[in-house]
Image (cartoon, helix red, strand yellow):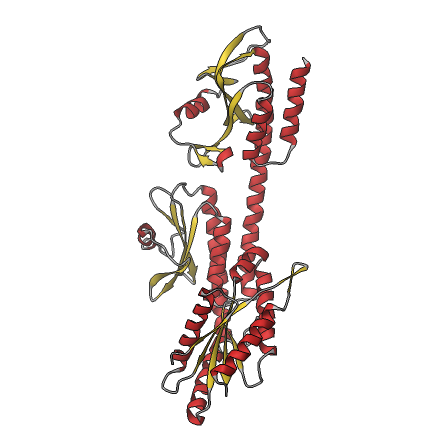
Amino acid sequence: MENKELHFLSEVSDVLAKKVDTARLAENLKETLNKYVPIKNLSIYVFDTTTGTLRDCKNNWQVMEDTPEIYDAYKNINSRDFVINSKAYKLPPVIGEITFKINSLFMPVVKDEKVFGITELVFENDTQINMEFLFLMKILAGQISLKLQNIVLDEQSRINVEFHDSMKNIAKIIETQYELNYIVPLIGEMLDRFISDHLIYVFLKQNNEFSLVWPKACKDERIYEILKQLSPETPYVLTNDNKIGAFPLTSEGEIIGCIVARSTLDTLSTRDISYLEQLTRQSAITINRANAYAKILQYATLDALTGLNNRRQFEVRLKQEIATTKRQKNPLCAMMIDIDFFKKVNDTYGHASGDTVLRTVASIIKEHLRESDIPSRYGGEEFAVLLPYTHIDEAQIVGERLRKAVENTPVPIDKKNINVTISMGLAEFNPEETGENLFERADKALYEAKESGRNRVCIDKNA
C-alpha cells in the first residue's frame, strides 16, 4: 500500500478516535477526505425503526423527508458494498485497474451484519476515482460503523443516566417543598429538560376540570380534546399522528392531573412513551406525598424550609393585625418581596442551591426586622411581611436596608459565592380596605419594581 493511502488511514483513525458528536464527526471526516479527493459534502444517516425514517446525524437527528435518492440508496445497499451514482455496487475480490467518474457514493453503516444507516459522500462533478479508493472507502465504512455504534450506545447510556436523575430529582422535591403551586412547575421544568424534543404541559384537575398549571399558556386545542379521552384505567392517550401524548396523574384510582408531551415535527417514540409513563408515575407519587404532607402541616405555623411563618399562619396573623390596627388606629404597612431571577439560580445551580438561596434571604429578613414584625414565606420565592406601628416612609427605610443587606450578602453555592437581589413592593393600610386589598396593592408595587429594573423598592400609595 502506498504512503498516501497509509497517511489517509492514519488520519481517519485519528478523527474516529476523538470524542466528538456526530455533527463534528461528519465535518472532520469531510475535511480529511478533502485532502485526497475533492468532496462537497459528507452526511451520516441512521434508520429509526420506530418511525421508519432516516435521521440526519449531522443536523440534530432530524428526520429526512422528500429525499428519495437517500431512501433508495438505503434500500439498495443491503447486499452491496456501495451505491455509486445511484447504482448498487459490490467490490470484486481483487483490486483491478478500473477508473471511473463519480458524483455520489453511499456506504452502509452496519451492526451485526445488518445495515442500520448509510454514509453519503457527494463529490465535485465527475471526480475520477479508482478501485484502490473504493477499497479504502470499504475500510472507512467499517470504521464509521463501529464509531456510530459507540456513539449511539453512549447516547443511550447518557439518556438512561438523565432519566434516572430526573426520577430521583422528582422524588426528592418533597424533601423541601410541599406546595403544589411551587412543586408542579419544578416537575414541569425537569420533564421539559429531559424530553427536550417535545413541549411539556402539566395540568391539575380542579372542580372536575383540567387546569393548566405549567407553563402559562397552551393554545393547541387538540390537547384539550385528548384530555377528555383520559380515564383512570388508561395508561396514556395518543393523537392519531402520535405527536401528542397525554399521561394521567392518578391517586387512589382517580385522575388528579395530567402530563402532556407535544411536538409539531416528530412523533413520540416507544422509548419516549416508556420514559414518560415512568416519570408521570413518579410525579403522581410526589404530588400525592406533597398533598398528604400539606394536610399534616396545615395546622402548623412555620414553613419547613425557611423557618418563617407559613402562608396559612400569615393569613391568621394578617386578620389579627388588621383587627388590632382598626381598633387602636395604629399605622400598618405590608411588604411583598420577590427574589430576582430565582428561576435562573435553579436552572444554573440546581434546586438544592435554590433552597440555600431561600434560606439565606429568609435569614436576612429575620435579622433586619423587629420582634413585632411578621415575616412569612408567601410561596415559592416570594415573602410577605407585616410591619405593625409603621408608616410608609418608615417602611421604605426598612425596605431599603433589607434590600441592600441581601445585595451585599454572598450566598455559598458549589464551593463559590454568588450574589442575589430582591425586588420589593410596599403599601400602607387604609382603614376602609381589607387585608387582601392591602396586599394586592403591595403586590402591585412589587410588580412595578420588577418591571422597572428589579433590585429596588416601590411604593403603592393608592389606598
Q: Does residue 402 show up? A: yes
In this view, the residue in front, 302 or 391, is 391
- Percent position (x, y) of residue 229? 32, 53
Tell me where residue 70 sits by quadrant. top left
Residue 56 lies left or right of residue 2; in this view the side is left
Q: Residue at x 57, y 32 (%)?
A: 25
Residue at the limit of the structure toward the bottom, as seen here: 328
Q: Does residue 301 show up? A: no
Q: Which quadrant is the N terminus positioned in? A: top right
- Percent position (x, y) of residue 147? 60, 30
Q: Residue at x 51, y 49 (%)?
A: 194
In this view, the residue in front, 355 or 429, is 429
Compared with 21, 419 (above or below) is: below
Q: Which quadrant is the C terminus positioned in? A: bottom left
Compared with 212, 235 (above or below) is: above
- Percent position (x, y) of residue 249? 42, 58
Q: Residue at x 43, y 52 (%)?
A: 200
